[in-house]
Amino acid sequence: MHCYEEKHLELFHDQIKFRDFIRSHSEYAKEYELLKQELFKIYSNDRNKYTEGKQAFFDKIKQLADEYSAK
């Protein structure tokens, strides 16, 4: 569960876009799964580094989701 302050609702909407895109594009879901497994091996004791390691992928999917929804 994620909680957001009202002033950070854009982040909430980005998370929903990411989730929906991943659910409808299995190839990216698999890529995300593998990334998370690899990051866990490297940063199992460092939650911040694990989260930071997912950021570039999140940004890529958000961009793709934005492009996809603009069609």
Image: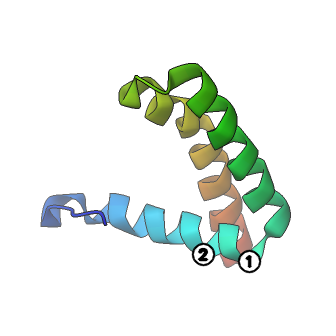
Tell me: 56 left or right of 28. left
Quarter of the image that includes the N terminus: bottom left
Quarter-wise, where is residue 48 in the image?
A: top left
Q: Which residue is drawn at the image coordinates 55% and 30% (left, top)?
A: 53
Q: Which mark is residue 24?
A: 1
Q: Position of residue 46 (x, y in %)?
A: 40, 23
**Circle 1 crowding by C-alpha within 10 Å: few under 14, some 14–19, many from 20:** few
Q: Which residue is drawn at the image coordinates 40% and 69% (left, top)?
A: 13
Vertical placement of residue 62 versus 55, above or below: below
Q: Which residue is drawn at the image coordinates 57% and 63% (left, top)?
A: 18
What is the CA distance from the residue labelled 2 to the residue labelled 1? 6 Å
Q: Which residue is drawn at the image coordinates 79% and 70% (left, top)?
A: 25
Viewer-proximal residue, 46 or 12? 46
Viewer-proximal residue, 60 or 50? 50
Residue lying furthest right in this view?
Answer: 27
Vertical placement of residue 9 versus 52, above or below: below
**Circle 2 crowding by C-alpha within 10 Å: few under 14, some 14–19, many from 20:** few
> Decide: marks 2, 1 in contact (CB < 8 A)?
yes
Q: Position of residue 17 (x, y in %)?
A: 54, 70
Look at label 2 and name its amino acid. Asp
Tell me: 45 left or right of 54. left
Tell me: 2 left or right of 65. left
Quarter of the image that includes the C terminus: bottom right
Vertical placement of residue 33 versus 49, above or below: below
Quarter-wise, where is residue 38 in the image?
A: top right
Secondary element type, mark 1: helix
Look at label 1 and name its amino acid. Ser
Q: Please, which colouring scheme is shown?
A: rainbow
Q: Which residue is mark 2?
A: 20
Viewer-proximal residue, 66 or 19? 19
Q: Position of residue 31 (x, y in %)?
A: 78, 49
Secondary element type, mark 2: helix
